[in-house]
Image (tube, rainbow, N blue to C red):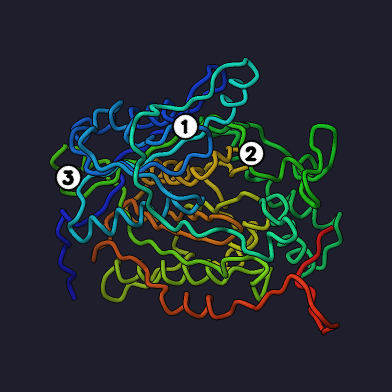
Amino acid sequence: MTVASPDPERVPVVVAAGQSIERDAVVSPVDLMERACDQALALVPGLRGAIDRLSVVDVMTRTGPAPATELARRIGAGSATCEVSTIGGNTPQWLVNRASTDIADGRLSVTVITGAEAIRSSRARRAAGLPRDDGDAGLPADPVVGDDLPGVGPAELAISLLIPVHVYPLFESVVAARAGHDADAHRRAMGRLFAPFTRVAADHPYAWFPVARTADEIATPSARNRIVAEPYTKLMTAFLGSDQGAALVVCSLAAARRAGVADRAVFVWSGAEATDVRFPTARPDLGRSPAIAAAGRALFAAASEAGGAGAVIGVDDVGWLDLYSCFPSAVAFATEALGLAPDDRRGLTVTGGLPYFGGPGNNYTTHGIATLTDLLRGAESGTLGMATGLGWFITKHALGLYGAGPPPAGFRRGDTTEAQARIDASAVETAAEMDRATVATVGTMEE
C-alpha cells in the first residue's frame, strides 16, 4: 500500500534554532531571547518577515508586561500575534505540539517559540544597586496561553509543601525504598545516574557548567557540594542562576520551501501531553508517573500512524533522547514510565541536563529541542529524537518526537483523553486533620 505524501502546507518542521548565554554583562531575558532569535533567523532570513505568531515561554525573572510584543518589535516581527505561556517546564514542548497541530490543520504557517532567564543578571543588578528591569511598562500585557491551574492544593499549603526542593525529595524516598537503598546507597546511585549527564554538558557550547564529573563528586557532600535537601546534593539539583535563552523557528514545509531553506527541515513526527493527579498529596502512588507513561504510549502510537501503513515505532527506534532532569527522581520516573534503562547506551540527555547545562526557569526544554534538532539535521533520514518536558511537581508533561526525514503520513498528535480520565479519577481524598484515629498507609517519608 502506498501512502500519499501529505500537503507540504500541513507538514510541520523545525528549520532553525538558536541559543544564547551570558556570563559577564548585565542583560535582560528579552535581550537573551533577541540574541537567540537573531541567531536562528539568520539561518533562515527569508522567514523573518513571515512570522505569524511569536510565543514566549513564561519568564520567572523580572520583566515587563509584554515580553513577546517587545521582542517582536526588536526582531522585526511586529505584525505577528504575540503571546506568553503559563508556568511549566512542559510548555516549550507543548508549544511545539500546539504549533504543529495548527500547521497540520492549516491555521498557521510560521511561528517562533522562544524563552530565556537572566537570574544571574538579576542578582548582579541588585548587588550593584541598579534598578530592576521592568521592560516597556507602557505596553498592554501579552495574552497568556496554557494551563494556569495551581501546582499545589489545600493539603500542601497546610504544611508549606510549596517548592520543588521540598517536594521532589519525597518522590525520591519512594524511588530509594523500591530500589532497596539506604540513604548512602541511593545517593551513590544518583551520582551514577547523573555522571554521564556531566560528560555531555562538558561538550556543549551553551552549557553553564561544561565540566565532566565523577559519580563520587556528585554524590559526596562537601563545602562546595552541600546538601540542598536530603538526599540531594547541590550537584544533583537544577541550576536556576544562569543567563540563557533559546529559540525555535517552526513552520510548514511549504513555507520552508518558499524561503529556500527546506534542506534545513527537521520534521515533527508526533506530540502528546498528559497530567498526573495535580496535587502531589492526592496521588495514589508517589513513586511513579502514570501521565508520562500515558503520554509516551500516545506519542508512539501517533508516530506509528505518522509512519504510514504497517509502521510500528517505539522508544527503541529513537536515536537521541532528552529527558527533563530537574532532580534525579524526575529522570527515574521518566525512565520507568518509558521503559528505558537508567544507563541506556544512547544516553538520556543531549544537553547535559538542568543541573549541568543549566535550568533556566521554564525554558530548559527549548534548549533541549534546539540541540536535538541540530543533531538530527546532520543525521540519516530514518533517525528519530525524543524530548520530554515537565511542569510543577512531575505534574504536567509534554513529549515530542522529531525526525531527520519526513513522516510518510504527516504529523500526528497523540490522544490521551481516556488515560487522562483514569488518572484524574485515581486521585485520593486528602484531609488536613482527622477527628479520630484511623488506619493509614505512609506514601513517602522525608529523610
Who is closer to the viewer here, 239 or 323? 239
Who is closer to the viewer here, 388 or 373? 388
Q: Mark 3 or 2 closer to N-term?
A: 2
Of tags 2 and 1, the one toward the viewer is: 1
Residue at image mark 3: 255
Q: Amino acid at mark 2?
A: Phe
Looking at the image, residue 399 sits to the left or right of residue 194; the answer is: left
- Measured from the top left, where is residue 429 in percent x and y? 66, 78
Looking at the image, residue 309 sits to the left or right of residue 445; the answer is: left
Rounded to the nearest whole Å, what is the CA distance between mark 3 and mark 1? 32 Å
Query: Tag 2's secondary structure?
Result: loop
Query: Tag 1's secondary structure?
Result: loop
Residue at image mark 1: 63
Other-residue count near label 2 (Cα within 10 Å), few / some / many at <14 / 14–19 / ≥20:
many
Residue at 48% x, 39% y is 59
Q: Quadrant of residue 177?
A: bottom right
Q: Mark 2 or 1 closer to N-term?
A: 1
- Measured from the top left, where is residue 115 in percent x and y? 43, 38
Rounded to the nearest whole Å, what is the CA distance between mark 3 and mark 2? 37 Å
Q: Mark 3 or 1 closer to N-term?
A: 1
Which numbered tag is attached to residue 305?
none
Of tags 3 and 1, the one toward the viewer is: 1
Q: Amino acid at mark 3?
A: Ala
Q: Amino acid at mark 1?
A: Thr
